[in-house]
Amino acid sequence: MSKKFVYLFSEGNKEMRNLLGGKGANLAEMSNIDGIEVPRGFTVTTEACMDYYENGEAISDAIKDEIMQYIDKLEEITGKKFGDVNNPLLVAVRSGSRASMPGMMDTVLNLGMNDDVAKAMGEKSGNPRWSYDCYRRFIQMYSDVVMEVGKSFFEELIDEMKEAKGVKEDVELTADCLKELAEQFKAEYKNKVGEDFPSDAKTQLMGAIKAVFRSWNNARAVSYRRMYGLPGHWGTAVNVQEMVFGNLGETSGTGVAFSRDPATGEVKLYSEFLMNAQGEDVVAGIRTPRPIEELKDILPNAYDELARNLKTLEKHYRDMQDTEFTIENGKLFMLQTRNGKRTAVAALKIACDLVDEGLICDKDAVLMIDAGSLDALLHPTFEPSALKKATPIGSALGASPGAAIGRIVFTAETAKQWADKGEKVILVRLETTPEDIEGMKAAQGILTARGGKTSHAAVVSRGMGTCCVAGCTELKIDYDAKKFTIGGVDYKEGDWISLDGSAGNIYAGAMETTEAVIGGEFARIMEWADKYRTLKVRTNAETEEECKKAIEFGAEGIGLARTEHMFFGEDRIPAFREMICAETEEQRIAALNKLEPIQQKDFEEIYESMQGRPVTIRYLDPPLHEFLPTREEDIAELAKTVGKTVKDINDIITALHEFNPMMGHRGCRLSVTYPEIAIMQTRAIIKAAINVKKRHPDWDNFVPELMIPLIGEVKEFTYLKKYVIETAEALIKEAGIKLNYLVGTMIEIPRACITAEDIAKEAEFFSFGTNDLTQMTFGFSRDDAAKFLDEYYEKRIFESDPFERIDQKGVGELMKMAVDRGKAGRPDIKLGICGEHGGEPSSVEFCHTIGLSYVSCSPFRVPIARLAAAQAALHENEEARIKG
Ligand code: PEP
Ligand code: MG
């Protein structure tokens, strides 16, 4: 049997998301729920989309035929005819991939219209205003989304018409005006596209379906996929659905409804609607929607049914639902449902509430939270006392919670450029569009002049966990002058402002913020996560403050203390530079003698703050270019300290210059050349441990882990291990106490993965340094890759940043090899990861599957890693259960 590419809604269900896309699968599921009215239709599958790409971006004849057969079926079901003047079947065409994805072609409504259909529909219904409103919308949407003519010209034409007629709102335009607009739109289409607007319904349908497929790979969709780690081979489905009309008059309308508040999680019908309107009007923020409570008075039956439907859907899906609905002459239709996007705060509350309501179990709760979204909760909020004192310069809708401070920018491009340079920015726009995605992601916060709770800015920023204040009507933006005015005061590009995305307030200047704490529902979810995860979570930290934060967030030890980071401080860097620039062993030892007590004190502090938990300390790994003095005054100071001339120091710096410092004299290579460095560090680590052990003899698990970086050849390791052990043993013997310690290595060079069996015979633990391992596997410089990787994403060579998410095919394979070979060399070897990937959810899951015992990440990502680790364990159990 040949492959089936089209499914009626009645043929599908929610489990078929991969084939039908999220929207299609849910339309099918919802159509089969008793008591919920869904306009009929069919879905063209994601496989048809992939076929389109394999077929040189063309829809095959076989798929075209199948689509037309389903049009026949839809005609039979509805009793209407496609392209027929007297009884036309009009359809909505919508994209829908597995995951809901802004940036793709969204919707074309009223497809199937032409001059004759518009005229006949007007006559037959006695409502020509309605029929021409449908027609002009169709031409507008088709031109914009199918032919990419752009929307602004059409909007200008509408504005001109409103001005000419002296009216303010679209709904005040008469049938004749709308008919005239339809003519103008068609002329504009011909002008831009070079041919007549298609009047044949089938041509229109194929054009729209092709546009949906094409939109899967447009720049916005590609960039969105990268942001959320969605693969390009999924493809999108296309939903073709019989139209119902919200623009038939004052007993018709359309809206968006959530079963709970997506910002707070509160249990209530959270919904907005517009009377006499079609779907796009609500989402695009063109007209300001009305709160749903008003519908109670206008159409009480429709209101009750909507509330009932949302309860039914929520029970059915066992999750908060986000729906679209249309009321046609008082009758309610549900147009789509999906698990609603929500803020991190709402996600936690909803998960806990659903457990308490008995709809889900704690495992479901752990699985339903997007681990990455917790990031939004782990960052500062406004300092309450500062907030109390401050007076907002304006307020609007708190569309996505959080506290943001930043400098004003007016375009997405500027937002990205400034953020790339390390600036905090607030993106201020009249309204946002999918083109703004990159800039929105780069911004700390988003402020818009238009739009409601379900506008693009609100929905997208909630998904991103970015603070957003939307629909501030008092805000007068002048893009040309790069300023906005509020309350009579001008604010220019570059000025600081603060946004409170929960209360919806805007403040001048940068307000003080306060640290996040884990409590309430967050703590409950974390407790459940800890119950199910098997992977331990450690942190990368060097300071007392970082250690404290990490413990508060649940860290179970330190997986990486980068000792060179301890010398970044103004007061410490001179001694470190002295060591780097030493020319003789004597000079170096003199410099090391200055460093040793500083290091010892730091290590004692770390051990104390970690209260007996495991601590891995890495030997010096300074890529020299990060530490050499560059400023004249620093060079002069160094010259003075070591009794040399400025010229001498400059000569030393020149001699130390490396063409490729990341592959240069760093890591273990430094101590191979100068073992006195490893000796000094061992002394500091062990002396600190002895002191701490004396203070806490009961800390049974206190076993410092000494880690040698950048090993590529086992003999490098054995050479240094000899010095480490000799030094440590002598100190422990002298102290007369029992102190265990481990000596292990980082695995961050491909050769180390390949020779891992030999290395494991010598090393007691491995910790994957996936930053360097990624750098060296790809041969991409960590410091420079960002400059050209954007091109890779645009050209779809890469779907995500390999420095952010582990490249499982390449780097991941090397890791697996190292795990297997490492275990062959030492069956009980301890395995962990301390590269940046250790806090990224998909990478954490990967680490779980290859059998690591811990991940280590920055303190702020510890809760994310805990949750991701639990999800990994639960996914594994589920797979094992399915396999039986
Ligand atoms: C690594 O390479 O992954 C690592 C953790 O070390 P660093 O980032 O300090 O090179
Ligand atoms: Mg490294």
Image (tube, rainbow, N blue to C red):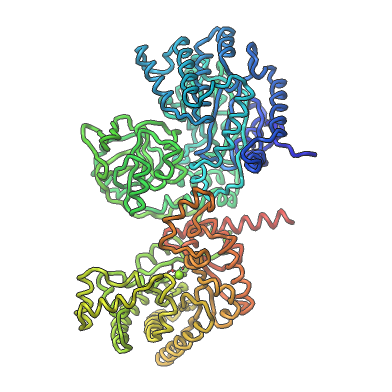
798 on left or right of 49: left
What percent of the width, then of the height, locates residue 549? 39, 62
Q: Give coordinates of residue 20: x percent, y percent.
A: 65, 38
Residue positioned 72% across, 24% down in the render = 73
Front-most of 225 and 281?
225
Image location (x, y in percent) of residue 523: 47, 54
Name the residue located 69 percent from the left edge and 21 percent from the top edge.
75
Which of 251/202 is in front?
Answer: 202
Query: How many numbered circles does the render carry?
Result: 0
Quadrant of residue 19 in the image? Answer: top right
Residue 458 position (above or below residue 530): above
| Image quarter hosting the C terminus | bottom right
Farthest front residue?
Answer: 194
Image: 630 above or below 233 = below
Q: Residue lying farthest right?
A: 1
Question: Is residue 372 at least partly visible in the picture?
Answer: yes
